[in-house]
Amino acid sequence: MANEEQVALLKQGSRVWNDWRDKSPTQVILSAANFAYANLSNANLSFSYLNLVKLNFANLNQANLIFSDIGGANLNGASLIGANLSNTNLCLADLRNTDLTQADLSYANLSGARLSGTDLSNANLSYANLSDAKLSNANLSNANMAGAQILRTDFKHTILTETCIGDWQLGSSTIFEGVECDYIYRTYDTQGKELTGRLPVDPSSSFAPGEFEKWIEVRKGALDTIDITFTDGINWQEFFHSLQRVRQRHPEAHIAMRSVEERNGVFVVRFGVASEYTGDARQQLNADVESQLKLQLAEARGQIKELRDSKDSLENLLKEAIMSPKYRIEQLGNLADVNHGNMTATIHNHYGQDADTILQKLEALREYAKSFPEEEKEAVQVHVEGLGQDLQQFQKPSTARSKTRLAGLLGVAIALGTHIATATDFANNVLELADKLAVPTDALQPQLQQLKEIHPEFEWQPFE
């Protein structure tokens, strides 16, 4: 059974819970906390850091968990009907056989999560990151997956009837096998809040057995042409800078922009990929190019809308931009030699001169953690990987989101107490990282004061 005192604190909301945790570091280690079978329905857990917590078979119906960090948590068999998990980190979480009916998972990070047998019917998964997630035998009927990332996602024997797949971030490595799908929706009406664009179009007809999978295979085959949708306009200057960066990373793909279509303010840009690669190597290349394009072009969305008025001026701009040398940029130095892959390039793109420091601090925190006890080591891994995911997924993560991760890292330093000599050095690296991520010292005062109590020699200065 769950600890009743901790359940009572959680019932009072994240502020009470987090204040208690800050004042009682020796009484709780969240990675070992066990709320299995606890009744936490309607609890306010927003902005909490419940990474690696055990919540299996817990009742979390209607719970508010927005912007929380539940990475790596065990939620196997939990009930989360109608729960608000928007913008929540659930990376690598165990969500097998959970009930997420009508849950809000929009913009959630579910990469690598285990969702086999999960009920996601009527759930909102718009713009969620489901890359590398396992969804075999899950129920996604009537779910809104508009804009969701499903690269390398496993949909074996999943129910997809009535699912909205508008602007689905599909890759050639996405697995569809034995899916159950009578019909799908291709668009989501944000004003009317309803699924639209039914396929098959005839409301009385359904896909024949295996027809949906064949339709998907055609879309996979069309990855030689990759479509990117921009719903709120395009910053064209950044668009061409981003495109050039992807071309430099994948010169073997010979990426070309084939067409631009505009309808009611929505732009669809089609890219062609030409390569001598064949078979699995070709599929992997296409998947990598698609992922890079969507990642790099994400920041070009929704910033300039004046170009909608004239198709001719748009076409002229495209021709000029493609031919003009001013849009060509130099190689990105030795970034390809740094073993941080896409995250490295993205952080450089978003943070400029601060990028190297951010990467160094993330690596330093990983190195410090190697000498920590196993539970603290796992907690550091979850928080650091969570930060990496945020930095890769968002142009600049919200201060509240970054604060949650950084507070969790300082919580590790607190939990180490005086047993690990490098705890304060670890904390100082966290603070330097906070500075570069624009998280003010004041936002971390509870953790810093607690560290001061444990380590009287520990000092810190507000960032200017």
Image: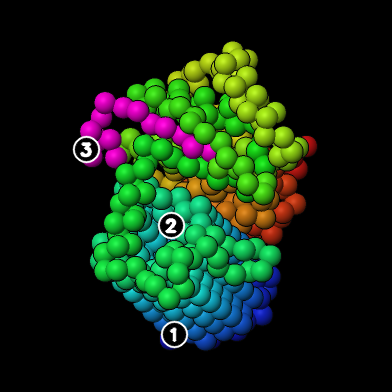
**Horizontal relation, residue 450 to residue 156: left or right:** right
Amino acid carrying label 2: it is Leu
- What is the spatial separation of the Cα atoms under label 3 and label 2, in whole angstroms? 25 Å
Q: Which residue carries the number 2 mark? A: 130
Amino acid carrying label 3: it is Gly
Instruction: Give the residue at x 57% y 16%.
Output: 323
User: In the picture shown, does residue 72 fall above or below 388?
Assistant: below
Q: Earlier in the sequence, mark 3 or mark 1?
A: 1
Viewer can see residue 81: yes
In the rendered image, the quadrant that contains the N terminus is: bottom left
**Horizontal relation, residue 277 to residue 32: left or right:** left
Callout 3 touching callout 2 (CB < 8 Å) = no
Q: Which residue carries the number 1 mark? A: 37
Over which residues does the magenta segment extend?
269-283
- What is the spatial separation of the Cα atoms under label 1 and label 2, in whole angstroms? 27 Å
**Horizontal relation, residue 355 to residue 421: left or right:** right
Q: Which mark is residue 70?
A: none
Q: Which mark is residue 279?
A: 3
Viewer can see residue 383: no
Q: Judging from the image, what secondary structure is the residue with disc 1 in?
A: loop
